[in-house]
Image (tube, helix red, strand yellow):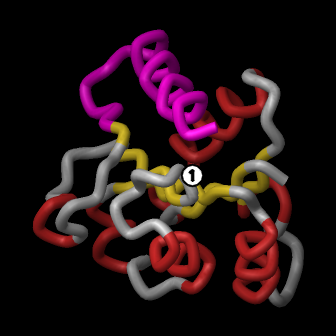
Amino acid sequence: MDYFVAYHAADQKWAEWIGERIQEAGYTVELQSYDYWARSSMILEMFAVSAVADATIAVLSPDFLAENLDRPEWQAAHAQDPTGALGILVPVRVRQCDVEGTLPGVEYVDLVGLGNGAAADRLLGRVREAR
């Protein structure tokens, strides 16, 4: 599997949009909303899937930064690639939030304020660059 998408529930629509763009570009993607919603051990399953994914996309927002920084499903990627420079962790900011204050030095894709076309181009540019 190419990408696992980690996100806060408040950003589900963004995560699904990102997943769709990644799939349209020919990569495989796993998202909690598509793959784990009916399963009882969702956190454990997400951690297992993130461990076998080539890369993890972290959907950054105020909610994610406030509540998801200690979640194991993206922490493994962050530990291997703390700045995002290696492409193992692809942080994508979808709403205004202080990434530098919470994750200093992280190289992220900024989609805030972009239209769909420009956002897709920026996202896929980073994904292709990482590959």
- Tag 1: amino acid: Gln
Locate the C terminus and report the quarter of the image it occupies.
top right
Task: Tell me where residue 115 sits by quadrant.
Answer: top left
Q: Give the camera-side residue of 107 and 42.
A: 107
The percent coordinates of residue 120 (x first, y second) are 51, 21
Q: Identify the residue under disc 1.
A: 12
Q: Give the camera-side residue of 13 and 47.
A: 47
Prevailing secondary structure of the magenta residues: helix
Does residue 72 lie above or below 52 as drawn? Answer: below
Residue 7 is left or right of residue 37, and the answer is: left
Q: Which residues are magenta?
A: 110-131
Does residue 101 lie above or below 111 as drawn? Answer: below
**Image point 39% across, 79% down: which residue?**
69
**Image point 56% across, 43% down: which residue?**
13
The percent coordinates of residue 59 (x first, y second) are 46, 53
Residue 66 is left or right of residue 2, and the answer is: left
